[in-house]
Image: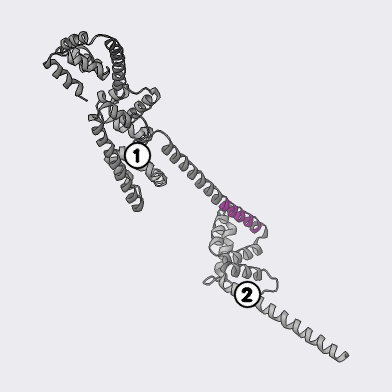
Amino acid sequence: MENTSNVKEKKTSKFKIVIVVIVVLVFLAGMTFAYFKIPSLNSKINSLIGRLPWISSRGNQSSLPEGVTSEKLDDLADYYLSIDMEEAADKLYLIKKDDEMLYSSLIRLMNKKSATKTGELIKLVRNLEGRDDLLVALHDELTKEKQSKLNEEVSKLEGQDLSITLRQIEVLLSSDNKHREELADIFNKMDENILANIMYYLDEEFQEQIYSLLPESKRSNLESQVLSVSSKKLQLKDLASLYESKPIAAAIKEIGNTELYSLEELGVIYSNMSILKSAEILSNIKDDDFIKDVLASIRREDSLNNQESTANKITEAIEFLKEYNQKINELAKVYEQMSPDKVALITEKMINNNNTVTALQWDSEPVFEVTDAVIITDVLSKLKDKTISRIINSMSTDNAHKLTQMLAKP
């Protein structure tokens, strides 16, 4: 039993030795591989070995960097110890960054010649290394600050009124080239849909400047977006021509609210219609807030296109037409209570009188003239169909024919 126990103990002991040997061999193999593959580790190990007291001077010489003799190293050590401390530290700092092994060799030799001065130089070199880290940190902070300012500028241009953004971009593009790099960063970061809308209102000269600041992929996408915006604006202008010829009641159903079109789209439509037609439609809408919003959109669209705003004239025309329509409605109530024969007599006199009673004028030019014929036609159009038929029945054939034509006009 005792022999069996001894055998087991011997086997266990041998097994442990084998494990230890394997671990040591793996560690040595790993360190050897790292020594030859990792330059910084190689340099540090050589530096550490060089400081060992039992390493001979001959050993030191053999560990010198390739092409560097002990004489050259000695000359360099004397030179760096003789010149200004800060200048020497700068040179040693550059050597350390480029060749750690050469730096270690120099420091060892300089330390033998003058330990005090070498110690001070080492401190100065370390300070320079710390300064290098500080510069990196400062540069990173500066980069973040620039990025933050860039994001703020992009957000401002995208969020503020489009007319203000246009003017700011035109000023920047018209200035010298010192802003070009900054502008390139801004345009590259902006939302393409917003930038395309801006581009649509810019002159071709400014458009080309912006395109030149963009990479090819961004430029191609932006050109497609600008074409899309142009197509949509053209459609809205065509709609303006359509509504110009539509009856007032039919136009109000479609462009007298925001069910079909946004306020921005309505601004394009109304700004491309005649002032009088726009005023006729808006004067028959009871929602004052909607009218104010549409007028604001018209002003904005005219401003974006560098045109004199028609909004003020439309407002003036709305007031004129509202007052006129109110009087027509009051007269219609009166005429509804009169006998058809009397209304017929008045109508026959008025439909043949085209003399101007009142007019809406701009720059001393009449743009909307009100005659007797216009007044009586507008009044009769407000009466009940039964009342109108009795009035026409009491008129002469010629006048009845003429009145019928006037009432049939849109």
Q: Quadrant of residue 172?
A: top left
Q: Is the residue marked by circle 2 packed among few (<14), some (14-19), or many (20+) residues within 10 Å?
A: few
Q: Quick check: 199 left or right of 48?
A: left
Please state which of residues 213 and 284 is positioned toward the viewer in this rendering.
Answer: 284
* Residue sitting at the far left: 398
Tally of numbered discs: 2
Mark 2: amino acid = Gly
Determine the image quadrant of residue 129.
bottom right
Query: Residue 359 placed where, x, y %?
Result: 22, 14
Quarter residue 230 falls in: top left
Q: Is residue 347 inside the magenta stretch?
A: no
- In this rendering, the answer to whether 82 lies above or below 187 is below
Q: How is the image coloured?
A: one colour
Residue span colored magenta:
118-134
Q: For the C terminus, which image quadrant? A: top left
Q: Which mark is residue 167?
A: none
Residue 363 appears in the rendering: no
Please give the label number shown on residue 30: 2
Q: Position of residue 216 (x, y in %)?
A: 33, 53
Q: Are marks 2 and 1 in contact (CB under 8 Å)?
A: no
* Residue at mark 1: 198
Sequence-first disc among 2 and 1: 2
- On the image, the x and y values in percent for residue 265 come to 33, 35
